[in-house]
Amino acid sequence: MNVEISKRARRQIERIQAWWVKERPAAPGLFLEELATVDRILRTSPELGSIYAEHASRTVRRVVMPKTRHHLYYRYRADRDELTVLCVWGSKKERGPKL
């Protein structure tokens, strides 16, 4: 399966990881570890995430990262065997991301 990470998601991952290293010195690698676990799971079960939104041509799914309390939003295209990570969003925010 081809997995792509959008530019937006890359920026968010970098920002979250920098925060995690600074603010969580007891577990500085936890965010990236949980992200890697989600990546492995989605590569074998890409439709595992719950449906977050449906647009005319695509379905956006969400997976919760319980240890770090972040949500990973992605789109899976079975016809192309392609998964695109759209964004990573903190669950403490009062609203969801604009997708």
Image (cartoon, rainbow, N blue to C red):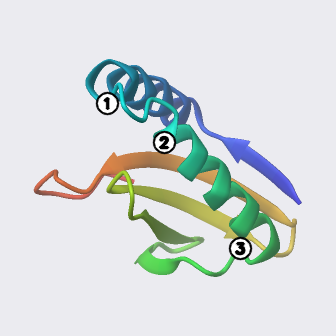
Residue at image point 74% right, 78% down: 45
Q: Secondary structure at mark 2?
A: helix
Picture quarter with the N terminus: bottom right
Q: Earlier in the sequence, mark 2 or mark 3?
A: 2
Q: Secondary structure at mark 3?
A: loop
x, y percent for residue 88: 43, 47
Q: Secondary structure at mark 1?
A: loop
Residue that mark 1 sits on:
24
Picture quarter with the C terminus: bottom left
* Residue at mark 2 to residue at mark 3: CA–CA distance: 22 Å
Residue at image point 10% right, 56% down: 94
* Residue at mark 2 to residue at mark 1: CA–CA distance: 9 Å
Name the side, left or right, on which 78 lies relative to 99.
Answer: right
Quadrant of the image occupied by residue 77: bottom right
Q: Residues within 10 Å of mark 2 (few under 14, many from 20)?
A: some
Closest to the camera, between mark 3 and mark 1, is 1
Q: Earlier in the sequence, mark 3 or mark 1?
A: 1
Residue that mark 3 sits on:
46
Residue that mark 2 sits on:
30
